[in-house]
Image (tube, rainbow, N blue to C red):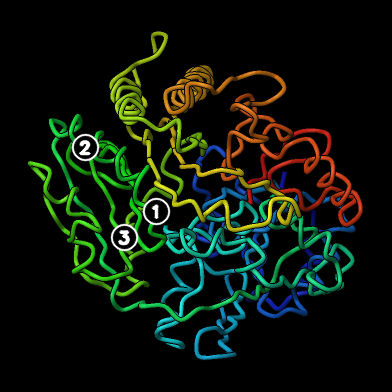
Amino acid sequence: MPVSHKHLSNIRSLLPSNSLLESSHPDYRTETATWAAQRNQKPSICVRPQTLEELQRIVKYLCSSDLDFVVRNGGAGSASSRDVVISLSKFDTVEFTKQSDQEAVALVGAGQTWGDVDLKMEEKAPGYVVVGTRTPLVGITGSILIGGLSWLAHEYGMIADPANLLDAQVVLPSGECIWAAKSAPDLMWALRGGRFSGGVISALRFRARKYPSHEIYAGPVTYPMSSLPELSKRINEFCHKQHDPRTAFMGFFSNPHLSWFPAPEGIVLMLFDAHGEAHGRSSDGFKWALDIPGAEDETKTMRYCDVGQLQASAMAGMGTSNNHMATLLLPDESFTEKSFRDCYEWFDDTITRTFEGIEEAMAPSTFIILEQMQPNVFLSVDHAKNPTAWPHPARHTHIIQLGTGYTATGNADKDASLQTASLKLLGEGCKAGNDKYEINGSGNRYHSERTGFTPTFLEEGLMSMEGVYGRENWTLMQDIASKYDPGSKFRGGWTVDGWSQHGR
């Protein structure tokens, strides 16, 4: 049902005409797109405020109305609603203030992606970096609300950790604008991985650090599938023994059918070494990876802002399929040669498999990525002080990110069966990645850990909020949400009483 004439008239009175995008506007589709096609509710209108004052007016109005709305940044979190999407794409500034030779502060408009921010940091402050995501299409606000992983996290911790994220400007449901670190420290805690903002985040302050940002050795190395046994062995050795915070990799199986990263069948390692190319090619770096028979080396020296662009092709996947994803924790001691091979067996079976008489396979949306994490990613915070809403694992832990999905057929019954199949296969992938994973009504468990997942993706039926956050933090999050958002307007991934499909 379209937004009523009365609501539309009121919204027009609050914003200039170029801040209101109806479905016929040429920017509407871009500003409302979602990564997962099934999450796109095709909102009646999109509002795109251009100033803080405009944002305050529209937030106050929408929170006092009965309209369904959501805040969108880059779209990777699949934020959507029936009535109104607030796009923050005009909040796109980066201001740099140097504090010493080694550190500075970057004040960043909240509507940008990390690809935008990295390029602007290179322009305004060459030689300084902000801890941001590996993938350039991810929005900066979405990344902090899920904790945030980065090539730089191996040295400095997660994006939302207090050492990196210093403050957040938030427009509350009343329209009031605050800086949360001093005015609302409990809210500041909740947005560090809690998928809850209490309002609309309009700007963020990050610590910027001096870094050898023009000397990064990075890029892909591709292997034939025949290299799997040797590669599994070498990866296992590297993960357990190499704890240099300036070297890391992620590995995945290339999927010729994947819409956003098509590549011939094989295995890809994406390497990163901030010590430079000589170190990266040495026995202290990745010589082991380069020496494996069949390796095709595309690595080179580049700027830090160009490292993220290696994954820029992922943008082509926006809205191309219905998909479901999970990010699974794998403690270092549980990672073995067999782990990588088990992941491949699940991947290979999934991309070739049809399900319960459905002829469409899951190939176009299936992926699995092993992200090697150095100890400092999760161990850089003081766990006893519980400084973030998402409780970091208290031991050296790696990440397995996986996804399944399908292209909608237009047949409701068939699409419902495909969705069931996709979620079932995703659960099987979680089991392949971590054999202690359990699907059950109360959440997932891994040994004594409070969480078996990061909050990056939440899939109802595979995980629970208490399972992801732990009982103590989940209870605190509910209390904070009730305090700042009693009308349940800003709980992108959850509500106190259940799940929300808004995304972020």
What label does residue 475 carry, if any?
none
Q: Which residue is mark 1?
A: 243
Q: Whole-percent x and y of residue 484?
A: 88, 57
Q: Which residue is mark 3?
A: 272
Label 3 CA crowd tier, 10 Å (few <14, some 14–19, many 20+): many
Q: Quadrant of residue 223?
A: top left
If the image is split into quadrants, where does the N terminus sit?
A: top right
Mark closest to the chain's N terminus, 1 or 3: 1
Q: Whole-percent x and y of residue 300?
A: 19, 66
314 left or right, relative to 431: left
Q: Whole-percent x and y of residue 275?
A: 30, 70
Say above or below: 203 vs 407.
below
Q: Quadrant of residue 207?
A: bottom right
Mark closest to the chain's N terminus, 2 or 3: 2
Residue 411 visible, this orientation = no
- At x 60% / y 82%, what residue is drawn? 105
